[in-house]
Image: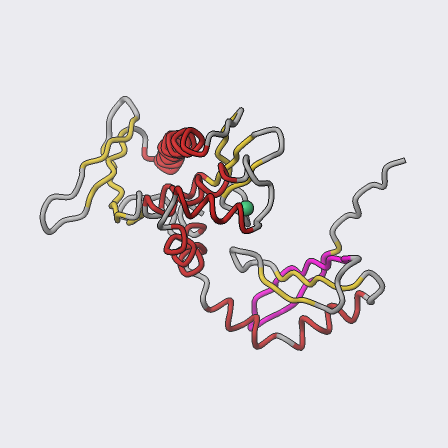
Amino acid sequence: MAKRPRAPDVAELVVGGDVLPVTIKRHARARRMILRLDRQATRVIVTMPERASRRKAIEFARMNEGWIKSRLCAVPPPVPFERGAVIPVRGVPHEIRHFDAKRGGVCVSERAPNSLSVIEVAGDLAHLGRRIRDWLKEESKRELAAASLAYAEAMRVRFRKISVRDPASRWGSCSVKGHLSYSWRLIFAPPYVLDYVAAHEVAHLAHMNHGPKFWALVAKHCPEFEKARQWMKRHGRVLHSYGS
Ligand SMILES: [Zn+2]
């Protein structure tokens, strides 16, 4: 009989007045306790050896309160999709504007000198957030599909399906069955970053690992991959602050 996955073990930790959920994960191969925050820095994750006690895990998190606090400070504030908000699209800041109209829709006007590019959203103001989100997801899917197709052709591999989702901690994934899945939030990043994530996932269709052959293939078809990885390390977290 297959073992049912264990339900996540969650406790709470109070750090500087914030109550943070702590997820305790037991890992057979863990040799010591490891502490990290999830990508949005809203959750503490303690990974510990199979036999360590839960109490020790919470104690360990509490001992590292200073580190957790310093990481929390780096969390960018949320930017909801609303009138006047400025969000990046393909790395370029755009201001969200609204105008009343019977028919809902989204249209973009690119930057005039000394002004911001604008995303104009028509229709009922109550639906503005949803309209922007839907529009961004569509744009994202279109660009990711185009990039994936181009890389698949260049790398001589095939994929079966593409989807965009909103995962908490990864930008893309590739299944053995050839299903590519991406975060729609990549549309906020500069184009070379979206391109790199597509190249990375498509390269997994040739090599299902992160070995030297895999990286050589990525580097061959996406020369800016190192720059894109650095960008993600520095700014990736901010992509989760928009529309939340
Ligand atoms: Zn990978």
Secondary structure mostly taken by the magenta-highlighted segment of the chain? strand
Q: Is residue 14 magenta?
A: yes
Q: Is residue 161 above or below residue 171?
A: above
Q: Please name the residue shown 90% across and 35% down the image.
A: 1
Q: Which residues are magenta?
A: 10-27
Q: Quadrant of residue 218?
A: top left
Q: Please name the residue shown 38% across and 42% down the image.
A: 195
Q: Please name the residue shown 62% across and 62% down the image.
A: 44
| Residue 180, x across and y down, in percent | 52, 33
| Residue 190, x across and y down, in percent | 32, 47
Q: Is residue 49 above or below residue 216?
A: below
Q: Please name the residue shown 41% across and 59% down the image.
A: 230
Q: Is residue 126 visible?
A: no
Q: Is residue 58 above or below residue 79?
A: below
| Residue 90, x across and y down, in percent | 31, 43
Nearer to the camera, 198 or 113: 198
Query: Extreme left residue here?
Result: 113
Nearer to the camera, 151 or 14: 151
Q: Is residue 71 visible?
A: yes
Q: Is residue 189 above or below residue 74?
A: above
